[in-house]
Image: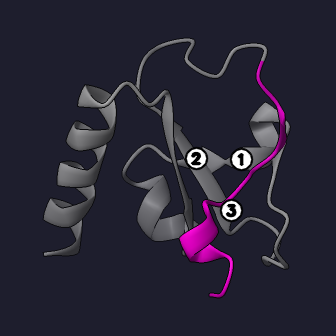
Amino acid sequence: MGSQLLSELEVRARLAGYPAVSVVGDPNYYGQRGYVMAEEFSIHNPRLVPMGNHLIKPLNAGALAHVGGMLEYPAPFAKI
């Protein structure tokens, strides 16, 4: 069920024009699905996330070339 949900998220994000999907979770689980440590793209999380658990997946080749910086969460996530 989780992988189907993740696949649907990636399809919808790609259709909406997003360059990548960022997650916080188990690197073994997400790594098998093409996610890598966000730090590989110099993308950092403003929250206290254990090293290696902030992962990202570019949705198109080169989507994160020359990108880096601090991830920003939309307002609804500010209270989580």
Residue pointed to by mark 1: 38
Residue 42 is situated, as x and y percent measured from the top left of the image, at: 85, 37
* Magenta highlight on residue 21: no
Q: Quadrant of residue 12 in the image?
A: top left
Residue 53 is situated, as x and y percent measured from the top left of the image, at: 68, 69
Q: Do the numbered discs 1 and 3 sit on residues whose CB atoms are within 8 Å?
A: yes
Q: Do the numbered discs 3 and 2 sit on residues whose CB atoms are within 8 Å?
A: yes
Q: What residue is drawn where x is 76% and y is 23%?
A: 67
10 Å crowding of disc 3: few (<14), some (14-19), many (20+): many
Q: Amino acid at mark 3?
A: His
Q: Quadrant of the C terminus?
A: bottom right
Q: What residue is drawn where x is 62% and y is 67%?
A: 75
Residue lying at the far front in this picture: please name it: 75
Would residue 80 be found to the left or right of residue 30 on screen? right
Q: In the rendering, which numbered label is found on residue 54?
A: 3
Query: How was this image coloured?
Result: one colour
SS class, disc 2: strand
Would residue 14 be found to the left or right of residue 26 on screen? left
Residue pointed to by mark 2: 56
Q: CA distance from mark 3 to mark 2?
A: 7 Å
